[in-house]
Amino acid sequence: MATKLCVFDAYGTLFDVAAAARVAAEEPGRGALQQVWPQLAEDWRRKQLEYSWLRAVTGDHVSFWQVTQDGLDWAMARAGLDDPELRERLLALYWELPAYREVPMMLARLKAEGRDCAILSNGSRDMLEGAVDSAGIGIYLDAVLSVDEVGIFKPAARVYDMVGARFGCAPDEVLFTSSNGWDAAAASAYGFRTAWVNRAGLPMDRLMAEPAHVLDDLTTIPELA
């Protein structure tokens, strides 16, 4: 069946989640962060995801913004960074994450071909709106779908249900793209056509399904759609 809709995860897929730590480390007076920012960025993202999975299992849902703060607190503690001002700066930068460089042109191509495009993310609605506005990609998006509407994080099926409810399409009419192997696997099992953006060259996750496509970046998404 032909693709009617291209849906993207947000963080790590469209937006560079390492940018907050990288940008802060380049600012004057950040010597301590300069030494550890790659590890801090990795720990921050990992704990953010782990906390979202655990909360999905237990049903103890909070906003993604809370999960993001909790993940940063853990990462800073591991790095030995006890700096409230740095914490606030890192959190502020998370609202201004840049899109990967190929994203605007890729989305523009999809829209020129008449495709509907949307975000489906664990992110809180206000966080997503901030990132979309900061990156200047809102003109290419027909919807920004947040788990705020269903009160549970991916990979719960209720999150993927939001796409059909919003656009009235069948799962196999959707091309879903994520940088998270677990997200792409769950979306494949759900029935979406999927692409995994494997920027880090990681092994395939051993899960319930595999993505249909594995990509280095988002450049070729229009060709798959």
Image (cartoon, rainbow, N blue to C red):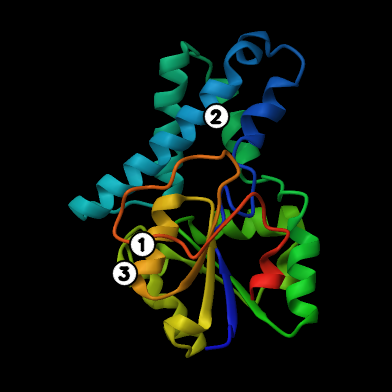
> Is 24 located above or below residue 195 in the figure?
above
Name the residue located 71 percent from the left edge and 46 percent from the top edge: 98
The image position of residue 20, as x and y in percent, is 64, 34
> Which amino acid type corresponds to the residue marked 3 in the rendered image?
Ala
1 or 3: tag closer to the N-terminus: 3
Q: Nearer the viewer, mark 1 or mark 2?
A: 1
- Within 10 Å of disc 3 (Cα), the crowding (few <14, some 14-19, many 20+) is some
Q: Quadrant of the C terminus?
A: bottom right
Q: With 65 as the anchor, is 140 left or right in this view?
A: right
Q: Which residue is mark 3?
A: 157
Q: Secondary structure at mark 3?
A: helix
Which circle marks residue 41 in the picture?
A: 2
Which circle marks residue 186 in the picture?
A: 1
The image position of residue 63, as x and y in percent, is 39, 52
Q: Are marks 1 and 2 in contact (CB under 8 Å)?
A: no
1 or 2: tag closer to the N-terminus: 2
Name the residue located 52 percent from the left edge and 61 percent from the top edge: 125
The image position of residue 136, as x and y in percent, is 77, 59
Which circle marks residue 208 in the picture?
A: none
Q: With 44 as the anchor, is 92 left or right in this view?
A: right
3 or 2: tag closer to the N-terminus: 2
Q: Secondary structure at mark 1?
A: helix
> Is 167 located above or below residue 122 in the figure?
below
> Is 91 located above or below residue 136 in the figure?
above
